[in-house]
Image: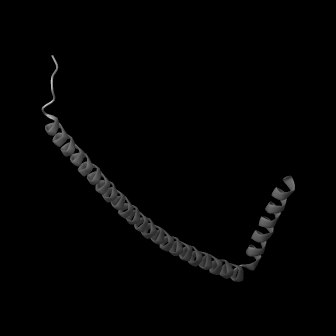
Amino acid sequence: MARTNTNGSTNDTAMADLTAQIDTLRNDLQALSGTIADLGQAKGEDAAKAARAQADAAQKKGAEAIEQAGAQARELQSHANGFMREQPAVALGLAAGAGFLVGLLGARR
């Protein structure tokens, strides 16, 4: 026995509903993808700002350390100059000994 299809319009309606739902899901996924991309870009910008701030802080600390090292070097130079003025014979002996050691080490190589 042959059967006839009497539910043709019901199947077409269900197919149209399913197609509409798929289109809605597709649009929602596109909107979600755009939102995620925007969020990623914002996080990237925040990370770049934080990195710039840390680099600036490190640069300031480095400049302060260089300034302190320069001040210590100037102070040591001042002390050395004072020592040379107070005890020139000892300073000359130390310079000669250092020169001898440098020459001795240089000759061995």
x and y, in percent, of residue 63 in the image: 53, 74
Q: Looking at the picture, tell me which residue is in the foreground, 55 or 99.
A: 55
x and y, in percent, of residue 104 in the image: 84, 58
Rendering quarter of residue 10: top left
Numbered marks: total: 0
x and y, in percent, of residue 43 in the image: 36, 61
Q: Is residue 98 left or right of residue 81?
A: right
Q: Is residue 77 left or right of residue 20?
A: right
Judged from this view, the residue extending furthest toward the top is 1
Q: Could you tell me which residue is drawn at 13 percent across and 33 percent down? A: 7
Rendering quarter of residue 78: bottom right
Q: Is residue 64 left or right of residue 76?
A: left
x and y, in percent, of residue 25 in the image: 25, 49
Judged from this view, the residue extending furthest toward the right is 107
Q: Could you tell me which residue is drawn at 12 percent across and 32 percent down? A: 6
Q: What coloring was used for the rendering?
A: one colour
Q: Looking at the picture, tell me which residue is in the foreground, 82 or 45.
A: 45
Q: Is residue 50 left or right of residue 107?
A: left
